[in-house]
Amino acid sequence: MAAQTELNITVSFPIYVIALASWVGWWLLVLFLGAGLSALPVDLINEFRFRPVPMKQDEFARAKSEMAKQVDKLIQIGKTLLEDRIKADKAGGCMTSSLLIYYYRCRLETAPRCSGTLERV
């Protein structure tokens, strides 16, 4: 029979904290891995059930025209905000943003318009 010996290893506090965190992390991994694996088939089935369906041609045309109206409204709001900014800069005498305003004014004037005649991709 072999003689039993006892080995004492002294470790610093940071090593002790790392070992304790690893031990706790291992148990958390075991716990959450089991929960995730049991929920995976349900998630995959629900992804299949609620997948996107293609739109009909009339639905697509209606949605596209509504979106074109929203885009025109947003462009109009942007132009109004830009005009207000220009008026505020002129009233306050601030000329620091004149190049930026000129840039955005040119971008808004040359922005493409949605005429509703684009083909469905």
Image: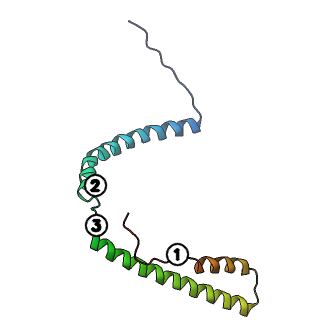
Q: CA distance from mark 1 to mark 3?
A: 25 Å
Q: Residues within 10 Å of mark 2 (few under 14, many from 20)?
A: few
Badge 1 density bin: few <14, some 14–19, many ≥20, Cα 10 Å: few
Residue lying at 72% horizontally and 91% vertically, measured from the top left: 90
Q: What is the three-letter code of the residue carrying label 2?
A: Glu
Q: To which residue does mark 2 refer?
A: 47
Front in this rendered view, residue 25 or 2: 25
Element at label 1 = loop
Foreground disc of the pair 2, 1: 1
- Amino acid type assigned to the residue bearing label 3 in the image: Met
Report the residue marked by disc 1.
112
Residue at image coords 76%, 90%: 93
How far apart marks 2 and 1 lie (CA) works out to 37 Å
- Give the numbered dot on residue 55: 3
Which residue is nearer to you in this view: 29 or 9? Answer: 29
Q: In x, y percent, where is residue 33?
A: 34, 43
Residue 78 position in % (x across, y down): 56, 82
93 left or right, relative to 72 = right
Q: Quadrant of the C terminus?
A: bottom left
The reply to whether the C-beta atoms of the residues labelled 3 and 2 are less than 8 Å apart is no
**Which image quarter holds the N terminus?**
top left
Q: Nearer the viewer, mark 1 or mark 3?
A: 1
Q: Position of residue 17 (x, y in %)?
A: 53, 40
